[in-house]
């Protein structure tokens, strides 16, 4: 499961139909997803500091594309505006790929994108990376600074994890966790994740449970601050 479904949707939707803690037994984390702030190459900013200066010189005139209201890249964009005291015009699309394509085509100047949805456009030079959203630099983009290197305290590392229905026998959970650890140790799996701009995330069920509890509180505040709500 992606973190957005587990820890963002409960704050975003009036009724999710599930309890993110009571209805699931965490098994283990799977991977960390790379997220980046990207721009069309024509944008006269090549890093976060230059973008902040540009946005403050033209309040509200720059737009930022997302995969839709309340999506992870929308909320990260809201986080960025709050952390840097800039104003960007949000343009929601129906999918991340469509947003990335329009930024590459010059219809919209900016977007926050996952590496899987943008890495091909980055490598072809159709998108430029202004900053990495994650707390640490990405192995796929070692020369691209994190946003947090310019904006202290900023950072989010989206993740994927595996869960089972509450009440799943403990021995089955342990067996799956052990099998996952072996899979994540496999070089071909690590290489495949790397091509997507993701990294393996080995951990225990207790670690995943703690991540869920912490992120539920964190994203609830971000959702509230953004005003995003889906009925």
Image (cartoon, helix red, strand yellow):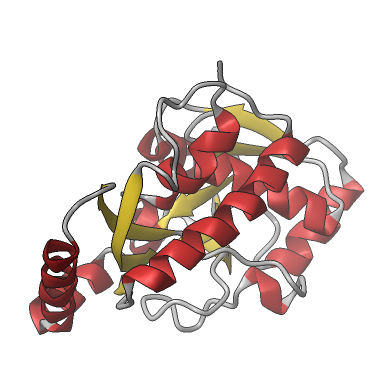
Counting from the top left corner in percent of width and height, residue 148 is at 68, 73
Does 178 appear above or below 231? below
Point 40% across, 61% down: residue: 159
Does 149 appear above or below 167? below
Point 70% across, 56% down: residue: 44
Counting from the top left corner in percent of width and height, residue 172 is at 11, 63
Counting from the top left corner in percent of width and height, residue 70 is at 57, 33
| Pick the front one: 193 or 230 | 230
| Pick the front one: 145 or 121 | 145
Which residue extends farthest top? Answer: 231
Image quadrant holding the C terminus, namely top right
Point 57% across, 31% down: residue: 12
Task: Examine the rendering and report whether any part of residue 84 can be seen.
Answer: yes
Does 66 appear above or below 216? above
| Pick the front one: 172 or 27 | 172
Point 36% across, 50% down: residue: 2
79 horizontally vs 108: left or right: right
Task: Examine the rendering and report whether any part of residue 120 can be seen.
Answer: no
Counting from the top left corner in percent of width and height, residue 91 is at 61, 29
* Picture mark count: 0
């Amino acid at each position: 499961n992606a973190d957005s479904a587990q820890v963002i949707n409960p704050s975003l939707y009036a009724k999710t139909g599930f309890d993110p803690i009571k209805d699931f037994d965490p098994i283990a984390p799977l991977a960390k997803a790379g997220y980046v702030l990207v721009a069309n190459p024509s944008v006269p900013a090549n890093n976060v500091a230059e973008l902040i200066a540009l946005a403050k010189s033209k309040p509200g005139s720059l737009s930022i594309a997302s995969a839709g209201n309340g999506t992870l890249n929308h909320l990260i964009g809201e986080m960025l505006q709050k952390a840097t005291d800039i104003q960007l015009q949000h343009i929601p699309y129906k999918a991340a790929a469509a947003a990335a394509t329009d930024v590459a085509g010059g219809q919209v100047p900016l977007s926050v994108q996952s590496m899987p949805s943008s890495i091909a456009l980055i490598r072809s030079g159709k998108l430029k990376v202004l900053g990495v959203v994650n707390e640490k630099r990405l192995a796929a983009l070692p020369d691209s600074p994190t946003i947090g290197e310019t904006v202290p305290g900023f950072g989010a590392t989206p993740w994927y994890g595996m869960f089972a229905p509450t009440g799943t026998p403990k021995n089955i959970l342990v067996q799956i966790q052990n099998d996952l650890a072996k899979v994540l140790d496999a070089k071909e799996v690590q290489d495949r994740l790397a091509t997507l701009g993701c990294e393996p995330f080995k951990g225990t069920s207790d670690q995943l449970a703690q991540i869920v509890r912490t992120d539920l509180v964190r994203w609830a505040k971000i959702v509230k601050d953004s005003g995003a709500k889906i009925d």
